[in-house]
Image (spheres, rainbow, N blue to C red):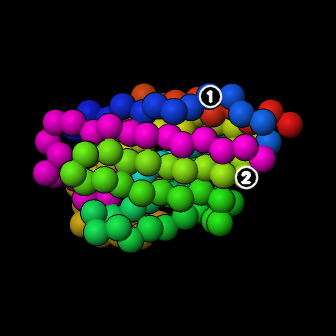
């Protein structure tokens, strides 16, 4: 089993920045890809960004150029740097991890093996 704990959410004005972190523990050796998802009130969960163990990244079109996903394998920590935030970025953000070795947006759109409980990001206009 893998445990994931997110931190770093909060309230920020439009145009501002936040950095989310996700600490992983447990059977870390089984993890390959890690990612961030978000779910806004009344909307379906969506994949925001995903990163492979080797550092290859993929992003949703809505966040390209504004968000950066990264991971520190030595610290077992995943990050999401969010810049130029917009009110439409308001959502609960979830950290996730997957054991599969394949790597594509299509593969992860449906979800991953392990999930954190989420951290709330609110962007005011």
| Residue 61 vs residue 43, the one in the foreground | 61
Q: Which mark is residue 84?
A: 2
Q: Is residue 20 magenta?
A: yes
Considering only vertical position in the picture, is 16 above or below 54?
above
**Residue at 28% over, 69% down:** 54
**Residue at 79% over, 42% down:** 14
29 to the left or right of 103? left
**Residue at 78% over, 47% down:** 15
* Dots 1, 2 in contact, CB < 8 A: no
| Residue 24 vs residue 43, the one in the foreground | 24
Secondary element under disc 1, as helix, strand or loop, is strand
Considering only vertical position in the picture, is 89 above or below 64?
above
Does residue 111 appear in this view?
Answer: no
Q: Label 1 vs label 2: CA separation?
A: 15 Å
**Residue at 73% over, 52% down:** 84
Task: Look at the image and give the residue range highlighted in magenta.
Answer: 15-34
Q: Is residue 8 magenta?
A: no
Pointer 1 residue:
10
């Amino acid at each position: 089993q893998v445990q994931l704990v997110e931190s770093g959410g909060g309230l920020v004005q439009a145009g501002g920045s936040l950095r989310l972190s996700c600490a992983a523990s447990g059977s870390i050796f089984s993890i390959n890809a890690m990612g961030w998802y978000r779910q806004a009130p009344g909307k379906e969960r969506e994949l925001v960004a995903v990163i492979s163990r080797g550092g290859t990244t993929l992003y949703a079109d809505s966040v390209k150029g504004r968000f950066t996903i990264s991971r520190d394998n030595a610290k077992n920590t995943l990050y999401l740097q969010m810049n130029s935030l917009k009110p439409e970025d308001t959502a609960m953000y979830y950290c996730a991890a997957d054991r599969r070795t394949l790597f594509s947006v299509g593969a992860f759109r449906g979800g991953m093996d392990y999930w954190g409980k989420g951290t709330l990001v609110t962007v005011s206009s």
